[in-house]
Amino acid sequence: MNRPIRTTCPYCGVGCGVLAAVAADGTTEIRGDSEHPANFGRLCSKGAALGETLGHSERLLHPEVRGKACDWNTALDAVANGFARAIREHGPDSVAFYVSGQLLTEDYYVANKLMKGFIGSANIDTNSRLCMSSSVAGHQRAFGSDTVPGNYQDLELATLIVLIGSNTAWCHPVIYQRIRAAKEKNPDLKIVVIDPRQTATSEIADLHLPVKPGSDALLFNGLLAYLHDRGDSNTHFVDAFTEGMQPALDAAHACAPSTAAVASGCGLREQDVTRFYLWFSVNEKTVSVYSQGINQTSSGTDKVNAIINCHLLTGRIGRPGMGPFSVTGQPNAMGGREVGGLANQLAAHMNFDAGNVDRVRRFWNSSNVAQRPGLKAVDLFRAVGEGKIKALWIMATNPAVSLPDADRVREALAQCEFVVVSDCVRATDTTAYAHVLLPASAWGEKNGTVTNSERRISRQRAFLEPAGEARPDWWIVSEVARRMGYAQAFDYHSPADIFREHAALSGFENDGKRDFDLGALATLADAEYEGFSPIQWPVPRDRPQGTPRMFADGRFYTENHKARFVAVTPRGPFNEKDDEYPLALNTGRVRDHWHTLTRTGLSPRLSGHIVEPFAEIHPQDARQHGIKDGTLVSLATRWGEMLARARVTETQRPGSVFAPIHWNDQYARRARADALVNPATDPVSGQPEFKHTPVNVTPYQAAWHAFLLSHRRLDVADASYCARATGQGFWRYELAGETPSWDWPRWARALLCAPLENGVRTEWIDYLDSGAGQYRGARLLGGRLESCLFVARTPELPARDWLASLFSRDALTREERMHLLAGTLPSQAAGASGGIVCACFSVGKNSIIDAIREKRLGTAEEVGQCLKAGTNCGSCIPEIKALLRQAQSAA
Ligand SMILES: Nc1nc2c(c(=O)[nH]1)N[C@H]1C(S)=C(S)[C@@H](COP(=O)(O)OP(=O)(O)OC[C@H]3O[C@@H](n4cnc5c(=O)[nH]c(N)nc54)[C@H](O)[C@@H]3O)O[C@H]1N2
Ligand SMILES: Nc1nc2c(c(=O)[nH]1)N[C@H]1C(S)=C(S)[C@@H](COP(=O)(O)OP(=O)(O)OC[C@H]3O[C@@H](n4cnc5c(=O)[nH]c(N)nc54)[C@H](O)[C@@H]3O)O[C@H]1N2
Ligand code: SF4
Ligand SMILES: [Mo]
């Protein structure tokens, strides 16, 4: 085992410290870093399984130009020439970069500098537009700067935590674990969850408010009015450090004349609203955590300010245990904001004011700095579709899957003259449209920094050699810049060079005028950069120890240093539901997958929790739309359609449907949620309304259903529904189709027989009941199970667990062969796992239910002692507790 390397998890914005050690056999052991202040050794299921995602099977290993592998020189020349030609013929605004919060700060800085500083256009936007831009805009309106005031420790010091539009348990699991631990220590800590759905997060809630989708501004305006009317205003703070309270209060009173009016407008019980308001009133130490349920709406910026208003009125900001807290999604969403990666920012938290443009021009020593904001993501891709953008470079993001109205995004990419994609993975829905493909180094191979949700900058460090010819993104961008004639300004030899320049720019002519200041880090020696310990910005020259909390002195970054209330008039979603599309589509994440599956999709452990795209729907709506649990449904909106497995559940709010964002053409067919999502955006931030699109749901009339487990990866072309998941030693396919085969045995043989099996003993075991429309077949190769296929007219098929377990066996016993087509051994007839709950120890739902019943287990700890489930990363504890509750209510 090599010495462990200290690095940072590449998934969510919690920014956990990780220790990675490569063993002699090439596998990587991953542990939480007990010294990292974000996680103190904890990891969630995704972080813990990082070692399973480092293989090279899917990697892009060398540059390609128009489908042909080539050397770096050829590819870099092609990119530089393609961009230079477009700029020469159509001007700098005819080109664009679309980048990502998954780049490291150094990569991001160089990309931003090239576009805004030297090409002279601000057409560089980032997927953080889809993620954080309403928070950024809300912060800027309230504080005059994009500043997150507090930190994670505040969650442990608070007596009330309000989680708004945040499925913390699944999306920021280590923050959730810290909150849970804080609640165990202090049972008086109250937790309120505001989300139309009941999620895993609601499991620790003292109060869950299932708000009507999009009604949060009314709820917080009501709170503002209530706090004021009860005399909870901190008049000293308001008078000395804020402005604009009265108009904000007037707007609040106008829409929220009473708690009853709020309750009815938000679809809540009045006593629940009152309880929430009262708790907020009496708990000075309140942290309001919010995330995509707030940001991703067409009035997201107003909602952010409606929340911040309540903290300003009560002066609950900048002190331990309190504050509004926007938690960031991607590992380096914050770093991207810091370098100016959003099209409406210039650099280092500076906007396009003339003074800033001049300052940056002098610092970069360029006569060509962009003078005004560029196109925001949705508009940018619209411009691509209209042929206005002639050359586009996409780095570290997968817009064909993740942008709203994603079918139009594909059309735009298909007709763009010159598309460059830098990615680690060869085949994504976006790389399919690239003229030039550039192989980027992946996590574990690159060096640089990231900033987490609490402004803490940490190092990512390499512990692996780059795969194939992959190179770090900063190097790729710098090489293109050189070839475009900017060699001097991009003469970087290491990420440390870039970091020092970035830090110097943030401190340049700053003198406390701008929040983002890393002045003290501008002269870091290479060795110091190597040994860099996590630190919270600002780190100005006179405060080299960093800054845990902001605004403690009541001084903000507006002209007059006062924080601003914003008067908010609540607005509903841009597209309300209509007769044709009577339900509201809400989209989001699942516990064990990350975005478009390019990494978590490789891990058998992570792929076992949820194996296919689904649509959650309330029983009442299911009845009305003729939908049964476990069947396939078609979801359709004015923008597109998808197929998914129905999950009928009381946790869903009547009137809404929830679908996950993860599945795409690489893992499924017709399952991209964003094909359905409307491209409506927030007028201030440009953030899309991902959480609300009018939708219709109908049963999908499949003539046959099937599952297939196969040692080899296959292409099941005849299936209209197909979802693939990675198993241990096999691929799992869930299938359905509109026309049944005339001859299933022949169909199965055509699909499952591989050409090169000479000399190996091949056996078939199969069974056909053509009357019942049933076929079951298994194929053995040299005595091992190679594949099996189960077809039926309905989705009722045997459980997959026992069959799946046979793929890790060298040979099958006689008994196993006999029962192969039954799908289970008689002794295990009830032994299906029911789906993985604990990813770390592969413990299934049914084993937990059985253990609870048979051993009379009462707590998650007891389940852990008995089955180990939940004892490693703890991400599944909310689900275990839900099973305990179910068992208790059944008993
Ligand atoms: N497992 C996992 N974790 C992740 C990611 C991942 O892909 N997988 N991605 C990371 C990224 S980039 C991000 S941005 C974060 C996102 O983290 P979250 O914001 O927590 O995740 P989402 O599932 O997008 O949405 C959160 C919740 O908003 C709710 N919601 C919808 N509409 C409304 C509404 O009108 N009001 C309120 N109050 N709530 C509403 C949804 O029901 C959902 O439960 O997660 C990060 N962490
Ligand atoms: N309907 C709906 N849509 C959404 C959302 C939603 O809630 N609902 N959420 C939105 C949000 S918040 C986000 S953040 C986006 C995320 O959406 P995307 O950014 O499109 O998703 P990822 O799968 O993370 O894409 C990252 C890509 O970069 C590659 N990559 C990883 N590391 C590197 C690297 O170091 N260098 C390079 N060059 N490439 C790398 C990966 O292989 C992958 O292809 O989705 C948005 N879309
Ligand atoms: S909470 Fe999980 S995904 Fe997020 S940084 Fe920590 S280990 Fe990674
Ligand atoms: Mo995000």
Image (cartoon, rainbow, N blue to C red):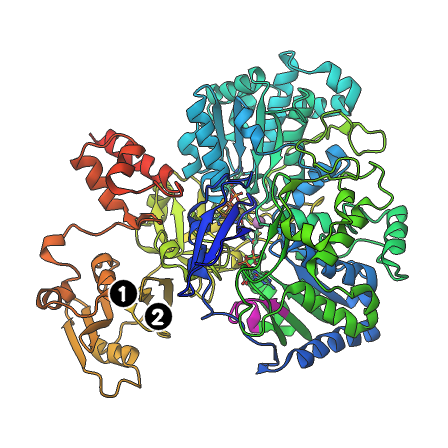
Q: Is residue 871 left or right of residue 127?
A: left
Q: Is mark 2 within 8 Å of ligand 2?
A: no
Q: Is residue 324 left or right of residue 637?
A: right
The reply to whether dot 2 and dot 1 touch (C-beta < 8 Å) is: yes
The amino acid at mark 2 is Ala
Q: Secondary structure at mark 2?
A: loop
Q: Quadrant location of residue 230?
A: top right
Q: Which residues are magenta?
A: 421-432
Relative image position of residue 812 (x, y in whole percent): 15, 68
Question: How many C-alpha atoms fall within 10 Å of the one at disc 1: few (<14), some, or many (≥20)?
Answer: many
Q: Is residue 152 left or right of residue 455?
A: left
Residue 414 visible within the image: yes
Name of the residue lying farthest toward the bottom: 758
Tell me the CA gap for discs 2 and 1. 9 Å
Q: Is residue 94 left or right of residue 317?
A: right
Between 532 and 715, which is closer to the camera in this rendering?
Answer: 532
Residue found 54% across the figure and 50% down from its top: 6
Q: Which mark is residue 706?
A: 1
Q: Is residue 517 above or below residue 342?
A: above
The amino acid at mark 1 is Ala
Residue carrying label 2: 719
Q: Which mark is residue 666?
A: none
